[in-house]
Image (cartoon, helix red, strand yellow):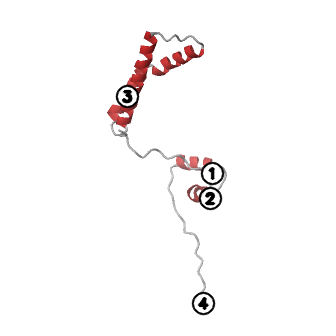
Amino acid sequence: MPEQITRKASPFCLRLTPEERTLLEREAAGLPLGEYIRQQVFDENRVKRRSRNKQPVKDHRLLSQLLGELGRSRLANNLNQLARAANCGLLNLTPEVKTSLLNACADIRHIRETLMKSLGLNR
């Protein structure tokens, strides 16, 4: 019966910039770099990083327009003021306040629809 030949692991070479190597050594925290890299690649118990969304933005111009509208709208500030007034019991639901709230809801709906469209997530 022929003996099984045991083979050594084959070496792997990786070129790093000095900055990359410094970062890798810092993250390895004293482990030999080969062992640290092996753990990061093959260890099932490692902490996995969240991956970025692979879907590209469908329309960058539309997304930029939406972000500009959102910045100009002061929606967050206005909603915060409404929440503060409601928590203090100072919010009287007058016709003007009701109209303002309905307008804010319409603005938010428009922003949501535009964002969905720019991301290619039309319903």
Residue lying at 60% horizontally and 90% vertically, measured from the top left: 1
Graded by Cα atoms within 10 Å as few (under 14), some (14 to 19) or many (20 or more), the crowding at tag 1 reads some
What is the spatial separation of the Cα atoms under label 3 and label 2, in whole angstroms?
47 Å
Query: Which is more N-terminal, label 2 or label 1?
Result: 1
Instruction: Check contact, mark 1 vs mark 2: CB within 8 A.
Output: yes
What is the spatial separation of the Cα atoms under label 1 and label 2, in whole angstroms?
9 Å
Graded by Cα atoms within 10 Å as few (under 14), some (14 to 19) or many (20 or more), the crowding at tag 4 reads few
What is the spatial separation of the Cα atoms under label 1 and label 3, in whole angstroms?
42 Å
Residue lying at 54% horizontally and 66% vertically, measured from the top left: 11
Numbered disc 2: secondary structure: helix
Horizontal arrangement in the rendering, residue 118 relative to residue 40 (left or right): left
**Mark 2 = which residue?**
35
- Nearer the observer, disc 4 or disc 2? 4
**Mark 1 = which residue?**
28
What is the spatial separation of the Cα atoms under label 3 and label 4, in whole angstroms?
73 Å
Q: Amino acid at mark 1?
A: Ala
Q: Amino acid at mark 4?
A: Met
Image coordinates of residue 68 in percent, x first then y, are 38, 25
**Mark 3 = which residue?**
66
Instruction: Check contact, mark 3 vs mark 4: CB within 8 A.
Output: no
